[in-house]
Image (spheres, rainbow, N blue to C red):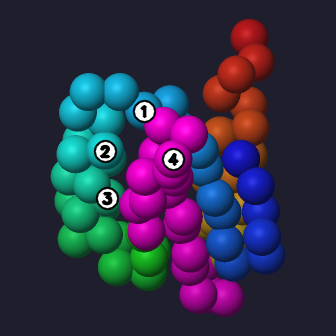
Amino acid sequence: MYRPGPLRLRLGLAGGPGVEERLRDLVEREAGCCSFFTFTVTLGEDGLVGLDIAVDREHAAVLDSLAARTAAGGRS
């Protein structure tokens, strides 16, 4: 997880068969219900699938919460 700015979050996800397609499907559905998100999916040469998430200033707290949950995800 990386925060290039207060309104952006970048995640690197392990790739594998179907991961990119499932992620693209998920972000399309999420953008449909929460139009304040902007998602960009990229496939890196290292096999990681990148997910960039951006919001407007009005929704910065939502992104902060998502970042906190993501950071805590690896902890017991």
Which residue is drawn at the image coordinates 56% and 40% (left, top)? Answer: 46
User: Callout 1: helix, strand or loop?
Assistant: loop
Q: Are marks 4 and 3 in contact (CB under 8 Å)?
A: no
Q: Are marks 4 and 2 in contact (CB under 8 Å)?
A: no
25 or 66, which lies in front?
25
Look at discs 4 and 3 and give the one toward the viewer: 4
The span shown in magenta is 40-59
Give x and y (percent) for residue 29. 21, 59
Judging from the image, what secondary structure is the residue with disc 4 in?
A: loop
Q: For residue 45, which numbered disc appears in the image?
A: 4
Give the residue number, with chain letter if any, for mark 2: 20
Residue 58 locus on image (x, y percent): 62, 87
Distance CA(mark 4)–CA(mark 3): 21 Å
Query: In this orientation, which residue lies closer to the viewer: 47 or 56?
Result: 47
- The answer to whether residue 41 is magenta is yes
Residue located 30% across and 69% down the image: 31
The answer to the question of whether label 1 and label 3 lie on touching residues, with beta carbons closer than 8 A, is no
Question: Of circles 4 and 2, which is in front?
Answer: 4
* Residue furthest top as drawn: 76
Q: Residue at x 23, y 63 (%)?
A: 28
Against 72, residue 11 (above or below) is below
Going by the numbered disc 2, the residue's amino acid type is: Glu
Q: Are marks 1 and 2 in contact (CB under 8 Å)?
A: yes
Q: Residue at x 51, y 47 (%)?
A: 45
Looking at numbered disc 1 in the image, what kind of residue is underneath it?
A: Gly
Task: Please identify the quarter of the rendering in which residue 36 is found.
Answer: bottom left
Q: Position of residue 57 (x, y in %)?
A: 67, 88
